[in-house]
Image: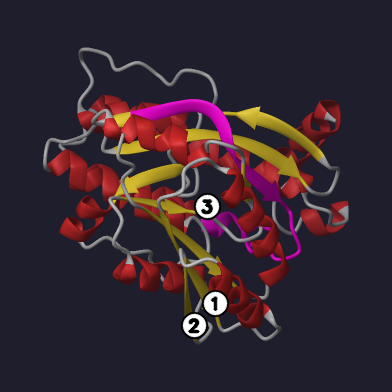
Amino acid sequence: MNEPLLSVIIPVYNTGDAFVNLYRSIKKDRYKNLELLVVDDGSTDDSLKILRALAAEDSRIRVLAKKNAGASSARNLALKKATGKYVFFIDSDDDILPSHFTKLTEVLEKGSKIVSCGYRYHRVYNDRSHDTYTNPPVERKPSDTDLSFVLRQDVRDGRLYAATNKAFRLDVIKRAKIEFDTQKKFAEDTKFVLDYLSDLMKNRELSIGYALEATYLYHYGTETSTVRESSLIWQNWLNSFKDFQNFAKDNGPVTRKDQRLLRKLKIRFHISHAFAVARSNQKFTKKLHYANIFKLLPATLLVKFRK
């Protein structure tokens, strides 16, 4: 079988050493027809030097250098340069497990317009890992519209939120002129996914595939993680919820069923925010600055119980 070219987009900001580890994992994947679009986002250390040294050894690596403007800006630059059939996003301080590219590409080649895989969720602060999103997704009901089907999945487990555990079709991205919102500092990849799904729905092409294996390794709480801090602020979660509200309006009419799902989604966001604060390594009195005690106490007890 001829392997389609994959565009793998990786922003780097002072994470050159972490990228070396990621690159070793990429080389282990049996899928070889890749263009690795590695964007140095104005690093102040020797990351750019490291990237260029690796590019001299592997012609698949294309190093793009730009002034610092954030991961969204870096990804957008790479999207303009991408030439592959399918697009993957990987954060430089994360990792992939063997067959990540192979498994997701197989699903896309069968006709899906987007594919989502499982996460191996590694909490750096206690060095514990667990796999998630390896269970079957919600089934579409006969009464579901495209909108209610997507919203029910978002309420159920959130596997559609992130961009890194997915692969996309470049032709859809180009057709809809989808970019990452450079003004957002939290859940910008969720907005990207919603924009992508919205285009599929408007073109009556909604076809979501699933690779029910944890092939993306997400390191939560690294020193270079921006989510570690931004997830503590409730307003960031609220702004992301508003993206879902706008997504619903754009793909309406919004039924009573959809409104109920949106309310459930907001509750889910409240719970997720409370857990994010409870898991943070800040003192309890500092955590109260981000979440009230009625949300924080139950979340803190559950976090301790889960340990």
Label at residue 17: none
Of callouts 2 and 3, which one flags the residue occurring earlier in the amino acid sequence? 2
Comparing 47 with 173, the one in front is: 47
Name the residue tied to disc 1: 40
From this view, report whether residue 33 is shown above or below residue 255: below
Label 3 and label 1: CA atoms lie apart by 28 Å
Looking at the image, which residue sits at the far left?
Answer: 203
The residue sitting at 25% across, 33% down in the picture is 147
**Residue 58 drawn at (x, y percent):** 53, 66
- For the point 23% across and 31% down, the residue is 111
Q: CA distance from mark 2 to mark 1?
A: 5 Å
Q: How many marks?
A: 3
Stretch in magenta = 209-236
User: Which residue in the structure is indicated by mark 3?
Assistant: 237
Q: Earlier in the sequence, mark 3 or mark 1?
A: 1
Nearest the eye: 8 or 27: 27
